[in-house]
Amino acid sequence: MKAIFIKDRLKNTMLVSAALTLTLGLSGCIHDNETVITNKEASTAAKQNLAHAEDRLATVEQDVEALLEKMTLPEKVSLAHASGKFHINAVERVGIPEMWLSDGPHGVRHQIERHTWASAGWTDDHSTYLPHLTSVAASWDVEIARLHGQVLGAEARNRKKDFILGPGVNLARLPLYGRNFEYMGEDPILAAKLVVPQIKAIQANDVAATVKHYALNTQELNRTGVNAKPDERTLREVYLPAFEAAVKEGGVLGMMGSYNQYYGTNANQSKHLVMDILKGEWGYQGVLLTDWHVDINTYDAAVNGLDLEMGTDVADYQDYFLAKPFLEMIQAGKIPESVADEKARRILRAQHTIGMYDENRLPGARNIKAHQAAARKIATEGVVLLKNDIVGTKTILPLDKKQLKNILVLGPNADKKHGKGGGSSEVKSLYEVTPLVGLIAHFGDQVKITVMRARSSELAAIASDYVESRHWTGTPAWNISYFAESKRNKLIEQSWIVDSKFSAKDIGKNQHITMVAKIKPLMSGLHQLNVETLGDFKLKINDNIVISHQVSANTSKELSALTHDIELIAGKSYTFEIEYDGKQHFILGWNAPGELFASEAEYIAAAQQADAVIYFGGLSHGDDRESIDRPDMKLPNSQDEIISKLIVANEKTVVFLVAGSAVEIPWAEQANAIVWGWYGGMEAGHAFADILTGVVNPSGKMPITLPARLEDTAPIALNDYNAKESLYTEGVFIGYRWFEQQNIKPTFVFGHGLSYTSFALTNIALSAASITADEGITVTAMVKNTGKVAGAEVVQVYLHDVESSVDRPAKELKGFAKVFLAPGESKLISIFLNKRDLSFWDINSNDWLAESGDFEVLLGTSLDQIKLKASFNYQQ
Ligand code: BGC
């Protein structure tokens, strides 16, 4: 397919894709000169990724057209929809093979049955579980992003997949968002710069990358219904740049639409998002596919550029919107046949590009040592040292093997595996090294490691070790139903909750909830059930009422403590059903035989005697998971209380947080050492031990702000988080930009991360004092390792537009460079800023605009550690 682009600088640029106009009968739209790229350029980007396949790439367009000519209309339509959970049927008559897709962003998902969500039961479908994309973002390293993509691509290919469903580039606008762990932080430019090498590396393996979710997928609350309504400037400057880079620079072959609505219609069939921007301005030549079951209709989806429908929940694949209904609309003349041609053309183009018709297609590789080593490397590069104070004469970290005889290890993530959780991004890992196993491997017999689970002073919910029922993402969970009245006739909502406790979001409103879980005791014997409730509470076990408590008008405001002893048998499954009618909260806990948890007296005494304490806390996929947002930003299960006590008991306490989203850290001031490790993949334990013991010097930097309180974040402060619509009221002030604008101090700023060595930044220089038009400018500076150990620093370039006709953030990240330096070594870093970097999206001209005037370049090692400044003048 060829496209003709008519550029007219004077009249605003008119982009007319001749092919699209011809085939779809749709007109062109207005665009900026700078963003107009030709089809040739777009396919060049894809080809750069596949340098090994020059011959087949040379004839892709001819091959596609030749195949298309032989196909009947029903055959073309059959390529526009799934014929199974994760595949598109072959068209054997003309030699088109079956096409296979698979999740997901941090490893190839296990094989799922052709037509159900059940596991196919394969025993050889394990794969390398890579650190999550938050960890890649925290590395601030394009080489790490490339390595991640290389492993993912090779493994996908080895599992005979054609499209891998990742990477994800939605932004962490809301810390509560259940899927932040699958993406690359809160900054559009950081995500844009890192997604490009990932895509290229994936596709270099003859597999199509699929960037997701286009666009504005920033909450799970009512994820298919919520209506995203950002203004155009916010859309362009914040929520689209990573997708734009994926298309223009990464040459991505797949893009998955999002679940949410965009101005009242599903994003997959939004003319503005798809036809105007993605396929119009950006010249995207790949496939736009839906997420699994989205709210679309045949006509809009067909004419507004959706190419492939996946996952629709109907019994017969012919009932997909882009199956029989699509065929019938074409046959009835309501949609031109050229629309089906265009969709098939895109699928065939991707298929030819990735070598589905080439006998020399790369074979890929899986579960090899090199991939495991890559997983370890990526995880270490993403670890962020948040705090490391001097106690005595030395900083607490790295831990010195020679000085330590005994270490106490605690916390819910000490021995937890995360691969199998989270939702569609789950990975059936060949193995997974937990932090505890990693530490033991490091220290061997030289250091005694004591492991404990600490019990909080507050009543704790029944530990997940006993919960047999599962949320669909695989995590132990209770089913929760919300009713309109106490008789429970009218169901309002059904969902899942991690623990046997409940807190009303809307205190003061009567709640009528029922929670059900299967509970399996670990030891037989007397279990003492303990309840704290503000309101009516009933517990049934296997349909027998064991606790029933009703409050009167007089007692409704008092907290009641209830208790009941019951004999339960180990390994037997019991159905626990709780009914709560009240305005506030309840907790159901128990004292079970063979108590899993140490009392406060026990763990504090152990902490006092230890040479060092390591608490592995944070979140798990009970909290960070697809389909549900977190209820608050607190560490679950009284972790704050336990950590605060440990810090007092032993000043050499290291708090190591594993999480994919921000949490409140109220004890940050008191703690002497805090580390953030993300979900670190199969080698997490080794990687974390590498950092804790100084085998690897930490160099990660936060790709998200860590707010002190949830109320400090923009969506909550502006009351813009609900099930109905997201107005993106903060505009372009996402994440750190908001905190700076509002002058709110977070606990740790964006870009923050310490090292075991020190660095000096000197000699900032700009290539010119003033620039004009499209020139661009190069920023250089010297970085020196002034400490005693080798390490890496991430130099961050923020830009400040001194005077602007619109409200711009005080600092906008525009580039970064990660430099590895031996002690005493210096290197020159160089970062190029182009006209687009100076620009904002101007709603009057519907174009990027760099205004004449002064710009300040701020060079630092985090948002609040700006070490050097320089200014230049720009004239249009
Ligand atoms: C998720 C996608 C995923 C798809 C297929 C959906 O629920 O939103 O990210 O790729 O399922 O598993």
Image: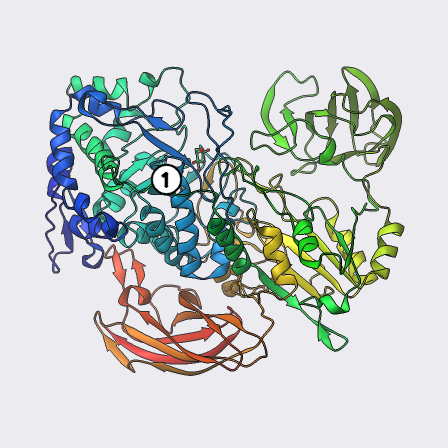
Residue marked by disc 1? 157
- In-image side of 727 versus 206 (left or right): right
Q: In this view, does 217 lie above or below 406?
A: above
Q: Quadrant of residue 358?
A: top left
Q: Quadrant of residue 420?
A: top right
Residue 112 at x, y = what percent?
Answer: 46, 27
Q: In which quarter of the image is residue 763?
A: bottom left
Q: Quadrant of the N terminus?
A: top left
Q: Nearer the viewer, residue 859 or 708?
A: 859
Residue 653 at x, y = what percent?
Answer: 75, 62
Residue 649 at x, y = what percent?
Answer: 83, 61
- In-image side of 662 versus 342 (left or right): right
Q: Which residue is at 76% across, 24% downward?
A: 571
Q: Which amino acid does label 1 sit on?
A: Arg
Q: Nearer the viewer, residue 448 or 767?
A: 448
Q: Which of 2 and 334 is in front in this view?
A: 2
Ligand 1 sits in which quadrant? top left
Q: Is mark 1 on a helix, strand or loop?
A: helix
Residue 419 seen in this snapshot = yes
Q: Which residue is at 31% across, 49% downward?
A: 204
